[in-house]
Image (cartoon, rainbow, N blue to C red):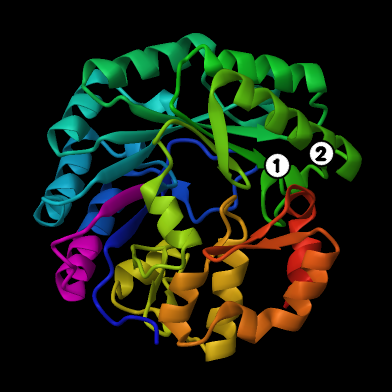
Amino acid sequence: MIQNNKPLYLYLHVPFCRTICSYCDFAHCVYQESLADQWLDALQKEIEYKEINPHLRTIYLGGGTPTSLSCRQLERLLKMLDPYRSETEEYTVEINPETLDDAKASLMASHGINRASVGFQTSNPELLKLMGRHHDLPMMHQTVERLHRCGIHNISLDLMYSLPGQTMADLAQSIQDALSLQPVHLSLYSLTIEPHTLFAKKDLHHLSDDAEADMYESIEKTLPQYGFHQYEISNFALGDHESIHNKAYWNYQDFYGISAGASGKEGWHRYDHTRILAEYLKDPLKTQDIPLSRKEAMFEMIMMGLRLKCGVSRKLFAETFQEEIMDVYGEKAEKLIDQGLLEADPLYLKASDRGYEILNTVLVDLM
């Protein structure tokens, strides 16, 4: 049975941005000081109600843009979380270079934040403009230097590929420019055009499937040359700098989801907060509860776990469901193993290198 102990992982969504990026479909609205103060009031109610585990292993502040808050508001937010960070190994904040200054960086470090995920996306000025981003490469260097000065050295950069009009040369240059910042972690995501984004309204499209596949293959080949190992379908790390928090998702651990636009999982339930800020302000304790059947939970564990290079832990699956993974999926799994798309050893069920490239197809066949 899925454990009913309190989660060790917490995600908190900050639903504000100073400007809205053309591709973004996350729950967000344009920052207003008074609205952010109301949000902090509502957030305090939710945090007090939740009775959060004081022994959290990770805290992740995502968005939106956490650094879009004023210094005063950011301090209030971090003070709310102080009671839960005494044993935290990894405390991450997402950063937009446009909204980080020395005061905010110093404040974050003083409250125990030790990891930053910075929105780099691309170094091509025309693509940045198309995306509605207002930073450039010199600003990225200033941001990284600012974080290092404050003692935050665990720095991850987000990059995007398959952007409208992006070439292989653009991507190669962006990777080199990102590497010049000496991050210890890189996340690379292909563009998805979501319905209500500015990209969709402008009828812009990502690149062809073939071009996207070529870019992904290029990334997989390039980054290991610089010491990065791929540990998840979109994530690469130097040494032991894999994201503890994100690995909790992929290993199907329970986690708190706090604030408007956040989701969580506890036991046999998922829950979603409203994405509409006004509704959250009215009732921050209201969530949509999604009970999980045993079959659904098994599917989710497999779906998440196969994203990892190492695959799904057979021990974890057995502990969660009191059944061996090969007893449940044996016939279909064996067929995929025979096709060279899955591999099984005593510890893990994982996608082969070939299976990893067509993971969605493997999952459809398995499930």
> Helix, strand, or loop for circle 2?
helix
Query: Quick one: quadrant of the N terminus?
Result: bottom left
Calculate the distance from the C-alpha at mark 1 to the C-alpha at mark 2: 7 Å
Which residue sits at x=14%, y=54%?
Answer: 80
**Amino acid type, label 2:** Glu
Structural crowding at the residue carrying mark 1, measured as other residues with C-alpha within 10 Å and reported as few (<14), some (14–19) or many (≥20): some
**Element marked by disc 1:** strand
Q: Residue at x 16, y 73 (%)?
A: 51
Instruction: Classify residue 338 by image quadrant.
Output: bottom right
Q: Is residue 256 above or below residue 161?
A: below
Is residue 124 something one can see in this rendering?
Answer: no
Q: Which mark is residue 19?
A: none
Compared with residue 116, is residue 180 higher up or lower down, i.e. above or below?
Answer: above
- Per the image, is 34 magenta? no
Residue named by callout 1:
190
Q: Is residue 232 left or right of residue 321?
A: right
Query: Residue 289's image quarter?
Result: bottom left
Q: Which residues are magenta?
A: 41-61
Residue 347 on image: x %, y %: 52, 64
Q: Residue at x 80, y 68 (%)?
A: 336
Pointers 1 and 2 in contact (C-beta within 8 Å): yes
Q: On the rendered image, what quadrant is the C terminus found in?
A: bottom right
> In the image, 116: left or right of 189?
left
Residue flagged by tag 1: what amino acid is it?
Ser
Q: Is residue 47 magenta?
A: yes
- Residue lying furthest front: 346
- Residue wearing tag 2: 212
- Which one is in front, 139 or 320? 320
